[in-house]
């Protein structure tokens, strides 16, 4: 989700543009600048994002932008308690491919004083997630300890992202800090491959088939349940990247 940081690179400004000397800041040499007050500023930022998202896929250590294609997650745990199921699932060595193939469809930005509200619609044809998982689950009175590899492919995912932030000034530069972010992915289809759910290979296959048939129901539970685990991580990473991105750099100076 680091690509969202790229979004913030592009925000509105209404003060004279600061002169940037330090190289630790992102440079804009070959990027168009967006008009400050035009109604088309959303369209302009959309074009910038579509340019930057594939370009920054390997990250930029100076800007604190971590690589996001593949996006690597070393370890993440979810606690579960839904209906008859409760327990814990952890994943490790997860690699997520596809974020750099994002296409931004629409950007809306509202600035009110130093408050900013951003709305972004985007889509990506294919996202592939590979990794290891381990679980301790109680299903009714049944205890499961699944452990194995997974390979999940998402087809035609549409993202709706809404973020609220503040513009603040530091060392004569203006920056954006996000206070909250809402990410709503909608997926057309999923293919799940996994092993180790049950010790018995036939049961294993059955479970995977069930997961593939009922992924919509599973996803409807998993998404809100896991949100508290990943949403703060995404927000923190974006804000870390934003520390190095003075927004005036991407907006035309005031006349
Ligand atoms: C993961 O699954 C997808 C489609 O189901 C497949 O195309 C891909 O080769 C698999 N990747 C690995 C590393 O097994």
Image: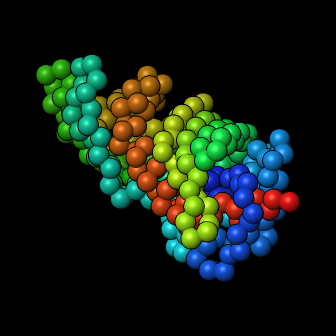
Res. 169 visible in picture: yes
| Image coords of residue 179 (percent x, y) | 48, 45
Nearer to the camera, 98 or 152? 98
| Image coords of residue 228 (percent x, y) | 36, 39
Query: In which quadrant is the C terminus drawn?
Result: bottom right
Q: How many marks?
A: 0
Q: Give the colour scheme of this rendering.
A: rainbow
| Image coords of residue 3 (percent x, y) | 59, 54
Residue in view at x 76 percent, y 59 percent: 251
Nearer to the camera, 89 or 131? 89
Residue in view at x 64 percent, y 44 percent: 113
Above/below status of 149 relative to 215 = below
Nearer to the camera, 57 or 11? 11
Above/below status of 154 relative to 217 = below
- Residue 247 in which image quadrant: bottom right
Res. 129 visible in picture: no
Above/below status of 73 relative to 141 = below
Residue 222 as seen in the image, left or right of residue 181: left
| Image coords of residue 110 (percent x, y) | 68, 39
Nearer to the camera, 161 or 133? 161
Residue in view at x 32 percent, y 55 percent: 75
Residue in view at x 74 percent, y 66 percent: 17
Residue 108 as seen in the image, left or right of residue 175: right
- Residue 107 in which image quadrant: top right
């Amino acid at each position: 989700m680091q690509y969202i940081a790229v979004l913030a690179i592009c925000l509105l400004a209404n003060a004279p543009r600061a002169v940037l000397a330090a190289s630790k800041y992102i440079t804009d040499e070959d990027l168009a600048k967006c008009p400050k007050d035009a109604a088309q500023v959303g369209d302009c930022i959309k074009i910038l994002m579509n340019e930057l998202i594939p370009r920054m896929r390997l990250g930029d250590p100076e800007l604190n932008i971590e690589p996001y294609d593949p996006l690597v997650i070393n370890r993440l745990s979810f606690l579960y308690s839904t209906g008859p199921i409760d327990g814990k699932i952890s994943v490790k060595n997860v690699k997520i491919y596809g974020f750099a193939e994002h296409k931004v469809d629409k950007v809306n930005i509202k600035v009110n004083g130093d408050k900013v509200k951003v709305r972004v619609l985007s889509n990506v044809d294919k996202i592939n997630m590979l990794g290891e998982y381990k679980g301790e689950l109680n299903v009714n009175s049944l205890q499961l300890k699944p452990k194995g590899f997974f390979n999940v492919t998402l087809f035609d995912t549409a993202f709706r992202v809404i973020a609220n932030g503040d513009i603040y000034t530091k060392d004569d530069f203006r920056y954006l800090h996000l206070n909250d972010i809402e990410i709503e992915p909608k997926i057309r289809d999923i293919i799940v491959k996994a092993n180790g759910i049950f010790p018995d290979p036939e049961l294993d296959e059955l479970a995977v088939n069930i997961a593939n048939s009922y992924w919509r129901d599973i996803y409807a539970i998993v998404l809100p349940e896991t949100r508290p685990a990943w949403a703060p991580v995404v927000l923190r990473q974006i804000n870390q990247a934003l520390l190095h991105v003075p927004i005036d750099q991407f907006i035309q100076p005031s006349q």
